[in-house]
Amino acid sequence: MQNKKYRIILLFSGLFLLWNMQAQIGTWKMYMAYNKATIVVETPNYIFGVYDGSLLSYSPEDKEIRTYSKIQGLNDTDIKFMAYHAGERALILVYSNSNVDIFLGENDVHNISFIKNNSYIQDKTVHNLEIIGEFAYLSTEFGIVVIDVKNRVMDWYRFGPAVRSVCRKDNYLYAATSEGTKRGLITSNLKDNQYWETVEGNQTSIEQMVFFKDYRVVILWNMVFYFDENGWLNSFGLNVV
């Protein structure tokens, strides 16, 4: 899977470099920085990439490369996170200023500016974006933002500590926070902190967290670890570049 991703990135980079060189011959148009690819997402018909915070797509069918900006309906610049919601065939774009777009196609973009425009949130930093089921989850400095992608609405769970990553196992939502890992029953009122409990393996520096089978796998101290059934931390011996 990782090798495939790297091949896509290399192919995408080469194709765009060729396109960019050709586009500069005898044409005038809007140019944005497209030097370093940071995110690549594959969808059924396109491959989308974020280059220096800017969005572009490549069509394997007709080899066409398109760039996107406010001219094509985006509501901001400098994309920090991007993920694909297969159910709604939508890209979720999170900008560096915490503005959010649900991108369905050129000039078909729905903006969610709750974090960006909320004057009561002092630190608006978004740490992660995860698609879990029908929802998009933003792990932020102030808690968890939940976006219902289909209905274009959002909710939020305000924590005391910062949230670095979110994942789900069975009927529980797990949150890696700066005070350790917590979990809450999905059917509970997760807006109330009393419904969140601390779990075994209470590490405070987790940057990313997912479940693989029955194991909670995390990125911690730039390495990959997993917690066993007793909550003990075990190393895969893998470094994260």
Image (cartoon, helix red, strand yellow):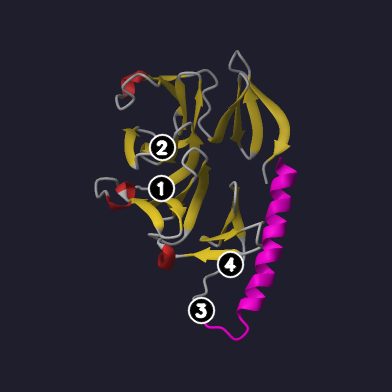
At which x and y percent is residue 90?
47, 46
At which x and y percent is residue 72?
43, 64
- Up the image or down, 184 lies above or below 239; here it is above
Task: Write down the residue under mark 1.
Answer: 125
Task: Write down the residue under mark 3.
Answer: 29
Q: Residue at x 52, y 60 (%)?
A: 55
Give the CA distance from mark 3 to mark 2: 42 Å
Question: Which amino acid does the dot numbered 2 rest on?
Answer: Ala
Task: Write down the residue under mark 4.
Answer: 34
Instruction: For the residues labelled 3 and 1, say whether their Cβ atoms are less than 8 Å apart.
Output: no
Which circle, 4 or 3, is nearer the viewer? 3
Instruction: For the residues labelled 1 and 2, say whether their Cβ atoms are less than 8 Å apart.
Output: yes
- Examine the structure image and report whether residue 17 is included in the region drawn in magenta: yes
Going by the picture, which residue comes out furthest to the front?
Answer: 62
* Residue 97 visible in the current orientation: no
Which comes sooner in the sequence, label 4 or label 2? 4
* Residue 189 visible in the current orientation: yes
Which comes sooner in the sequence, label 4 or label 1? 4
Give the CA distance from mark 4 to mark 1: 24 Å
